[in-house]
Image (cartoon, grey):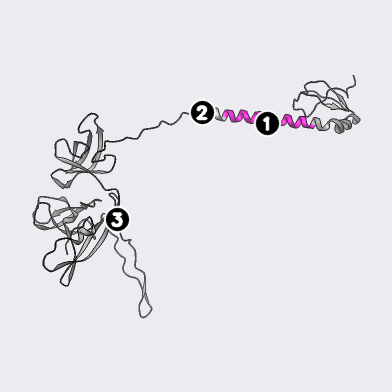
Amino acid sequence: MDPTMGHGVIGGHGVIGQATFGGAESSDAPAIGMSGYLSQADMQAAQQDGGTEASSLVVEADTVVGAEVSTETALAAVLEESAAPAAPVVPAIIYPSGRVDFNKPFQVFDANDDQDVHTDAKIIAVLTGNAYPVVIVSHHDGEQVVGQFDTDGDEMQGELKVENLDTEPRTLYGAVVKDGREYSLHEELFGSELEAGQIYLSGNQSIALVFPVTIPPQGIAPVLPEAGVEEAIEEEDNVPTTAAPVEPPHPDARWVNGRLVKPGDKVRAMKKGEFVERVCTVIKTQDDHKRTLYIQADVGGDGPYWALNKKIRPHY
C-alpha cells in the first residue's frame, strides 16, 4: 500500500474520526502514537478540500479536553469544601425578664438604703422552676455577696434589690432661682419642664429660668473639656506670649448637678432620712446619674456612702 494514502496524524490529540484527503475518505481509526507521510500534492489537496474539516476536529478536541479538566477541578474543589467541618453554633443565653430585665445592665443595692450600692454584680446561675430564679454575686465592703432574686428585683431574704440601669440618654430639667438680686441653681433636677417651673420657693425667691439637661446613658463617661495650651495672643507690643498650660481633668472626674467633681473635692450633702447638711470629701466616683459620688462626712456621719445626686451641693 502507498504510505501516502490512508490514515494520517491530525494534530496528535487522539481524535477519532474521518479525515478527507484529496477527496477520498478514510475509515475510523485512532490517531494516537501514529505517524504517516503525505505527498506534497496530497497535502495541498487536503488543505484545499479537507483542511477545514481536519482543523475543526482538532479545535473541537482541544475544547472538549479542556472542558473535562475544568469540570474535574471544580468538582474536586466542591468536594473539598463540603468535607470541611462546620463551626458549631452557640445559642445566646437569655435570662429571665419581668419588671427587671436581667438581659440588660442592672445594679444591686441595699433594700433599705438605695445609696448603699454593690459593685461588680453579675449572674452566676438561673434556677428553673423557682420563684427566685436569678442568682447574682456582687461585692460590698470588700466581701462577696450572693443573692437570689425574682423578676421584680426583690431578693429572697428581703435584704437586697435589683434595678435596671438607664441605657438611653435622659432629659431632665433644672431651674435657676432668683432671690432679690442673687441667682442660684436649684439643687434638684426634675423630670419635666412643668415640674421644674412649679417647685416650692420661699420668701422673695422666684424661678428665673428652666433649662434642659441631657443625662448620658449608664457606663458612658461624659464629654470632658480637652486639655491643651491656650493659643498665643499678641500684646500691644506685638510680642507673642503663650499662656500657662491648662491642667488636664482628673480621669475619674464626673459631672454632678452642672459641676465637674473629682475624688478629693469637697461637697455639701444631706443623707437620706437626715436633716443635717455636712461637708464631705469625695472618695471615688462612678457612672450613675442617681448616685455618682462616694463620699465621707468630714465631721460626724456613719461612714462613707454613695450619695444621691439631688442631695449634693457645691462647697466653696
> In what quadrant of the picture does the C terminus appear?
bottom left
Disc 1 to disc 2, how far (Cα)? 25 Å
Q: Position of residue 85 (x, y in %)?
A: 46, 28
Magenta includes 67? yes
Position of residue 128 relative to residue 119, above or below, is: above
Look at 81% across and 30% down and name the residue there.
Answer: 53
Which mark is first along the chain, 2 or 1? 1
Mark 2 lies on residue: 82
Residue farthest toward the top in the current orientation of the protein: 1
Q: Is residue 245 above or below residue 270?
A: below
Instruction: Tell me the SS state at disc 1.
Output: helix
Label 2 secondary element: helix
**In this orientation, does residue 260 appear?**
no
- The residue type indicated by label 3 comes to Pro
Quarter of the image where one finds residue 175: bottom left
**Label 3 secondary element:** loop
Q: CA distance from mark 2 to mark 3?
A: 51 Å
Q: Amino acid at mark 1?
A: Gly
Which numbered dot is residue 66? 1
For the record, the magenta segment spans: 55-76
Relative to 233, 285 lies left or right: left
Reading the chain from its start, which is encountered first: label 3 or label 1? Answer: 1
At 69% across and 29% down in the image, what residue appears?
Answer: 65
The answer, for residue 311, to whether it is visible in the render is yes
The quadrant where residue 242 appears: bottom left
Q: Amino acid at mark 2?
A: Ser
- Identify the disc placed on residue 222: 3
Residue 232 place in picture, x, y as percent: 36, 71
| Quarter occupied by residue 248 | bottom left
